[in-house]
Amino acid sequence: MSDEQRLAELGYKQELRRKLSGFSNFAISFSIISILAGAITSYGIAMTAGGPLAITLGWLFVGGMVILVALAMAEVCSVYPTAGGLYWWSYALAKRNKAAWAWFVGWFNFLGEVAVTAAIDFGAAITTSAYISLTFGPEVTAVRTFGIFLIIIVLHGLLNTFGVNLVRILSDISAWWHIVGVVFIVGVLAIVPDKHKPLSEVFFEVHNATGFTFAGAAIYAVLIGLLMAQYTYTGYDASAHVAEETHDAGRAAPRGIVMS
């Protein structure tokens, strides 16, 4: 069955052009997750709240939980490969109050997208502001950082107005950049330093610089530190949102969700 026929079965006709390959579908979600941007900009949160344990074992724990969510989403996406994604699935799967479920899920998804886009671009603004200060000397101020943030978010908005072709090219480059970049960073950290911390410290040491001192505060700090991994592991539903622009979406989009 063709992609167009599958959409017809779901009640509407093909309107978007299918220009994305399976790899490009994966690359979009993988780039939105962005382990480099997510982990680096939220590293301080986990180091002060939870410490190495939250960063290492916490990352593995959150990753395992996210895989379960991704597998469930991929299963639904394979049946309903539509650009609406989560809110469309909610409408299709709800036994009653379909419109209400779709409305709530759609709005929560939208608000989450707004929040995470702002967070990512503000992280980029902080990094850019620090680079400019180190390279050219101007002082880092809240006003300047916010101005850079506005420029970045407007540029990102403009990039998305040029259609899926540009997004496809940038996402493909980004995917390889992340893969090679992560391998390079891990390799440098493993080979270059003369000394390494003992494994017991890397995996089990807990830091609590949150200021909380009540009984069980260390556990609470670790839970806060899990935000580093959870913040990074967001946006993999993008493979579903571009399903109607992907060839063989019933297979490619679910794979993109899980593989990313």
Image (spheres, helix red, strand yellow):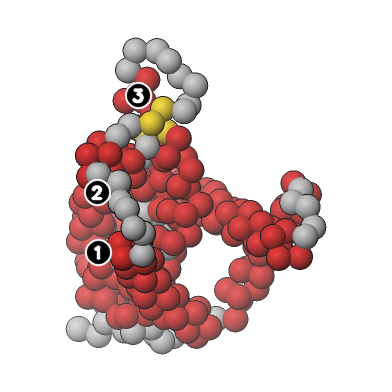
Query: Label 2 to label 3, Cα distance in Å?
Result: 19 Å
Q: Nearer the observer, disc 1 or disc 3?
A: 3
Q: Secondary structure at mark 1?
A: helix
Res. 60 mark: 2
Q: Quadrant of residue 29?
A: bottom left
Q: Residue at x 47, y 47 (%)?
A: 42
Q: Is residue 228 above or below residue 21?
A: above
The answer to whether residue 84 shows anywhere in this view is: no
- Whichever of callouts 1 and 3 sits on the residue coming sooner in the sequence is 3
Side (left or right) of 87 relative to 150 = left
Q: CA distance from mark 1 to mark 3?
A: 33 Å
The numbered dot on residue 218 is 3
**In this picture, is 48 found above or below 143?**
above
Look at the image and tell me in which quarter the C terminus lies. bottom left
The kind of residue tagged 1 is Val
Picture coordinates of residue 30, whole percent (x, y): 37, 67
Q: Nearer the viewer, residue 136 or 30?
A: 136
Secondary structure, mark 3, is: helix
Q: Which element type, helix, strand or loop, lies under badge 2?
A: helix
* Mark with earlier residue (2, 3): 2
Viewer-side residue, 107 vs 127: 127
The answer, for residue 120, to whether it is visible in the render is: yes
Q: Where residue 226 sits in the image (x, y, percent)?
A: 36, 40
Q: Residue at x 24, y 70 (%)?
A: 255
- In three-dimensional space, the C-alpha distance between marks 2 and 1, rounded to whole angstroms, equals 16 Å
Relative to 190, is 199 above or below?
above
Q: Amino acid at mark 2?
A: Leu
What residue sits 22% from the left and 66% below the top? 79
* Residue named by callout 1: 258
- Percent position (x, y) of residue 50? 37, 34
